Image (spheres, grey):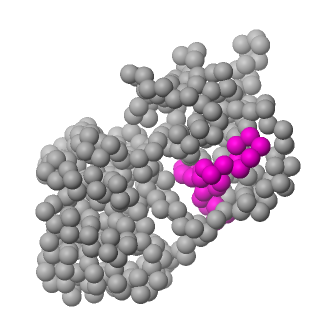
Amino acid sequence: MPIKKVMLLFLSLYLLLGIALTQAAGAAAGGVSASLKLAVEDSLSEISAVSSHNTYYVPLRSLSEALGWSLTGQKDGIQITGNSRSLLLPGNNGGAVLIDGTTVPLNTYLENGSLMIPLKLSVYLGYSVSYVPDKYLLRVWSGAAKLDDAAFADKYKAELKPETAPNPGTEDPVAKPGMTVYLTFDDGPSNTTTQLLDMLDKYQVKATFFMLGPHMRQYPAQVKRMGTEGFGLGLHGMTHVKHKFYASPAAALKEMTDANAILEQISGQSTTLIRPPYGSKPYFTQSFRDKLLGQGYHLWDWNVDSEDWKYKEDSATIYNSVMNQVHKLKAGKTDPVILMHDQKATLLVLPRIVEQLQKEGYSFGVIGAGMTPVNFWKDKR
Ligand SMILES: [Zn+2]
């Protein structure tokens, strides 16, 4: 094919995909679905595609198995080979390097230990991606597929409808709005973490931890346990010293990158979730956000402040304040993101809070990279 024609083909593919993904976002925003079962060639897979920031993401490993790709670790990234083509996926969200050497921008992230890639990556290996929102159809297919989209949607009509089971780490379109609580614990891990995890396990609830690098080094077993048990992993930096962390955007980024390296070394997982010390207002200004969120990090503050650092062992005050704030959010159908700390006093008040929330019908979620971040700047990156 002459080069111009190839470019045109690429361009039209890109445009088509752009439109499909915009529609997908619209569908997700309209409450149709934030995750879909992925159709692969002529059958329906077990893969759940998750919508985030206008793009559907799937676990690389599962997609590779479904499409018969081979993954080879290279020193500069993962080489993906399939459909008689190949491309390189460098680490650190470096996009994808095509066989002709061009780099296309792509965002990837880790979710519960598996690398999530945009489904559109398969287009660069010569596949087509179809999206038919009103039929809940999201499909990746090659020339080998026999059914067209309409026939496929018809055949799998019953199975294509999204399930109602909650999907941790993503916004569950079926859960009642405002009825999922995200417990978050800062400043850990600590000599309290084991008891805290035991307590959470006892109530069968999950939570998310925003941790400091040096503390992770001090309590590695606890960090490992969080990873294996499916707790949310987030970063809180290295120093927790205002003038050091906020010295410059580069300084803040370095603290998060260093903490992430420690997390990965201990648990085998890295994260894109960050919570700057003292929360993001007022110091985490535009230039800080551009720097860190531009690297793929997601900024998380809270909308319920337990002020447990202030009230310490005054459990009654903490409990009343938390429940008050939670009930206010309920009126606006907003999911509570509760700030607490990984410290001894938390053990005293936590059972009462969890029991009451469960009694009121709340479920407990883990913050995931696929969710729209809650922060004081309303920065949705
Ligand atoms: Zn803190």
Judge whether residue 249 can be spotted in this image.
Answer: no
Give coordinates of residue 132: x percent, y percent: 76, 51
Residue 354 visible from this viewpoint: yes
**Picture mark count:** 0
Residue at 21 percent of width and 53 percent of height: 221
Counting from the top left corner in percent of width and height, residue 277 is at 22, 56
Q: Viewer-proximal residue, 39 or 245?
A: 39
- Please tell me in which quadrant of the rendered image residue 199 appears: bottom left
Magenta span: 28-54
Residue 349 appears at what percent x and percent y? Answer: 23, 81
Camera-side residue of 332 and 117: 117
- The image position of residue 33, as x and y in percent, is 64, 61
| Residue at horizontal 20 percent and vertical 59 percent from the top | 188
Above or below — where is 280 with respect to 80? below
Q: Residue at x 23, y 69 (%)?
A: 196
Question: Outermost residue toward the top?
Answer: 2
Q: Quadrant of residue 139?
A: top right
311 drawn magenta: no
Residue visible at 38% across and 73% down in the picture? 204
Give the side of residue 185 with respect to residue 131, left or right.
Answer: left
| Residue 40 on the magenta span | yes
